[in-house]
Image: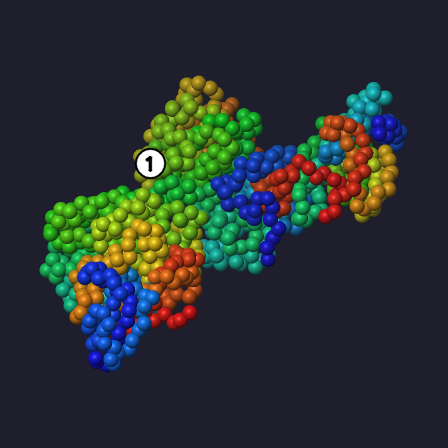
Amino acid sequence: MSDGAVLIRGGRVVDPISGVDEVLDVSLANGVIAEVGKDLDSAGAEVVDASTLVVAPAFIDLHAHLCEPGGEHRETIASGARSAAAGGFAAVCAMPTTDPVTDDPASVGFVAAAGRRAGAARVYPVSNVSVGGEGKALVEFGEVLNAGAVALSDGGRSIRSTALLRLAIEYAQTFDVPIMTHGEDADLAGAGVMHEGVVSTRLGLPGNPGVAETIGIARNVALAEMTGGRVHFQRVTTARGVDLIRQAKARGVRVTAEVTPHHLVLTHEDVEGFRTDRKVDPPLRTRADMEGLREGLADGTIDAVATDHAPRHYDEKEAAFADAPSGVVGFETAFAVLHTRLVLEGAINLVTLIERLSAGPARVLGIEGGRLSAGAPADVVLIDPNEEWTVDPATRLSKSRNTAFGGWTLRGRTVGTYVDGRCVWQRSPA
Amino acid sequence: MRRAVDRMSREIVERLGGTDQLVLMGIQRRGVHLAEMIAAAIGEAEDVSVPRGTLDITLYRDDLMAVGPKPVVGESKLPPEGVDERAVVIVDDVLYTGRTARAALNELMDWGRPARILLCVLVDRGSRELPIQPDIVGRELSVLGHQRIDVHVPELDGELAVVLEEREAT
Amino acid sequence: MTRPTSGFGKDLVGLEPLTAQQIRVILDTAEPFKEISERRIKKVPVLRGKTIVNLFFEASTRTRVSFEFAEKRLSADTVNIGASGSSVQKGETLVDTARNLEAMRIDMVVIRHWASGAAAFLAERIPSHVINAGDGAHEHPTQGLLDILTLRDHFGDIEGLKVCIVGDVLHSRVARSNIFGLLKLGAEVAVCGPRTLIPRGIEELGVEVFTRVEDAIEWSDALNILRLQLERMKGGFVPTLREYNRVYGVTLPRLEAAPRELLILHPGPMNRGVEIDSDVADGPHSVILQQVTNGVAVRMAVLYLLAGGAPDLAESAKSEEDV
């Protein structure tokens, strides 16, 4: 065994790709998974007792805002990468909605380098699709991918021009990367600050109708179908949207989709009382939508859970609802919230949850990771499925505290994260 | 009690030397009913209709911010003739600390400028907290601090009576 | 630093959180306050020494003046802060404005703000009593109360009354407060307007929707006609004001076709010839000026009740011992 080898002994190993779900040892060496099996030799290796833990491929987040450059008071790449590691993520995709935006080789290179320096979760830069995120002209896809970008997205902005989006999807085929899109008709979503429905009516807040997403997804599906290119749907929020993606996949259209933890467990009713801590974009929708998302997650229509981790400085949310910015932090609660509310309540099983957090997002990006077979990157998460804990916004590793789940008591927690065989985060014993 | 009311009615007329300028102002709620009785007695004896009004002193109380149940604000009503240059008789059931009478005086002053104000109560139970004395009294009762005096009037209680109760310990 | 609260809690941010009984107590309390405004000396000392700030982030004449009269007639000391020229315009956040006011030891804040939820936001953050004088398109509870008081004056009882709110319901806080309050008191409530100005899901609140004003008039006992803000035309919600008047204007011929005489309310300020014709506004069934009079009484009642005058709801009939 080589230097720095680790033997994770006797954990419940869950690897959705190989179908393994049994008590095994996992050995890590030279940055890769050396072996998965019974009673592995521990000679020369640091032994980690995982007898009460679940051992799984570490998570990959397709959607995060690390706020650097431009928003360092909210989060830095380093603090975000540490927070992600604490949530069991070995990799996070950093959205380009920075200031200045991430849309050229230099800015992409900056994010990649800062991510490497952080030495926590891997930071995968995502470049803008359009220059400046303005939806007018295409970024140099080849250059930004060369500089380290893994995908292209205009972040939370929907590309208004259907013609430009068509060109983007077609041009990206050269490089076989997905165009990540926010499937929403921007004009119809308008100035809406929450889901348009009985709650927005009662609260007197401008609404964003679910149909804005239906139209956006339908449009982008049509373009993917016509061009044969890859389109990824970020943050799907409606049952109808899930249906459209399911049908598209059945026709063989190359679309993938993600959903956030908050859209899977909260509805527009949870905004009642002008809860700015639950103001998100796209907005929390109806119970029927939430059920639709859960079905899509269970049947594989939704490929991935992505946090849409969006840090906000503590005083930014101290405003009237319409004036407060959208967004919630998500790395450190993602697994626990979904384990508590979906797995333990029977909506999906643990293997599916782990798949949507690891193998699913790896497949969307077409990258290594998300599996525990020999030779794969040694990105591993250790999970204590029984630990009960209460979310205290003040004790998180993110620089921001804008969680939607403050005070929630959760069951299950990520307790250790390995990236390239190196322990980047370990929960200190309570 | 009936006799006390009759006697008070006569005394009012004697003190004022007639009924020309008389206005009766009953304090909500039982003072209002007593004022009605007195007005009826005077009206019968003197063959006049005595102008009446009502005073609700809730908004003039000095204990709004103190804890405890608050009464619903009642109606204050001026007689059509007003109170300016009138001889106003404030009528209430029980005179105790004097704070109600103080409030009633303040309210009356906000309504106008009476020529003269008299205070007429059915029961004076003593223990004043303010330098206020009645002009016309039905009965004086010496009552301990923990005891409570209630006047019953026919309209609200079905009888005219003075009732002495042990106050509930608080 | 907490203040004594009454049976109404600390604040009045809307009618939605109130019970029917609480609304009735406010209306009942407003009755004796009507008389104070008829006195020669229109003032009672009940709020003497209380400091009230009227914090108006949005321009308003009617509501601010009405509150100010109510406060002064209860002997409170009042300060008015408007949006223009104040620190508000200099970029100060609502939180900082609130904290500064609090540091000056005020007792009550009456707030008007363009953002829905601003009153509740303030109420959660300062110990002073907060009264919502209109927050965005959310609620305008004292307007709702004065409308209901005016209806009660005329019909005696709210239960079973059919009230239709006509016009720009989408952007109207007055509409929402009326809907919440009237439904709690057992009225039947409808809204009428072009679908562009009727918010989604309003039926789920228990409200009937009419898209033709003739149908609304036929159904109703009373119409509460909302102001059509001229900006709505620019927003494309209605093509022109002229067309709005043609299709939705409450006109004398339309009222004359109704099976019964309708009571006409309007929260003001009116656009004569747009949502309401002059001969209706000035006609015998209009109670628009009585609404204004009732507004002062209702606001006095709310100020008084929040300041500590609220009766114990269970015992409100008792306790009249000499004080």
Query: What amino acid is at disc 1?
Result: Thr
**Quadrant of the image occupied by residue C218:** top left
| Residue hosting label 1 | C196
Residue B54 figure quarter: top right
Q: Is residue B109 left or right of residue C314?
A: right
Above or below, comparing residue A66 to residue C159 in the picture: below
Locate residue C120 relative to residue C322 in the image: left or right.
Answer: left
Foreground pick, A386 / B14:
A386
Identify which residue is drawn at 31% across, 34% down: C239
* Relative horizontal placement of residue B136, taking residue B31 as reference (left or right): right
Query: How many numbered discs sit on the rendered protein?
Result: 1
Identify the subunit bearing mark 1. C
Please tell me in which quadrant of the rendered image residue A309 appears: bottom left
| Residue density around tag 1, few if under 14, some if 14–19, many if 20 or more, within 10 Å | few
Name the residue located 46 percent from the left edge and 27 percent from the top edge.
C162
> Which quadrant holds the N terminus of chain A?
bottom left
Where is C125 relative to A425, above or below?
above
Residue A186 image position (x, y, % from top left): 26, 48
The type of colouring in the image is rainbow
* Quarter of the figure with the C terminus of chain A: bottom left
Residue drawn at x 43%, y 64% as measured from the top left? A394
Q: Picture coordinates of residue C224 (x, y %)?
A: 46, 31
Q: Residue at x 39, y 56 (%)?
A: A404
Residue A399 picture location, percent across and down: 38, 66
Q: Secondary structure at mark 1?
A: helix
Q: Considering depth in this image, is A233 or C154 the residue closer to the camera?
A: A233
Q: Is residue C10 visible?
A: yes
Q: Is residue A58 visible?
A: no
Measured as percent of width and height from the top left, residue A238 is found at 28, 46
Which residue is at the far front?
A39
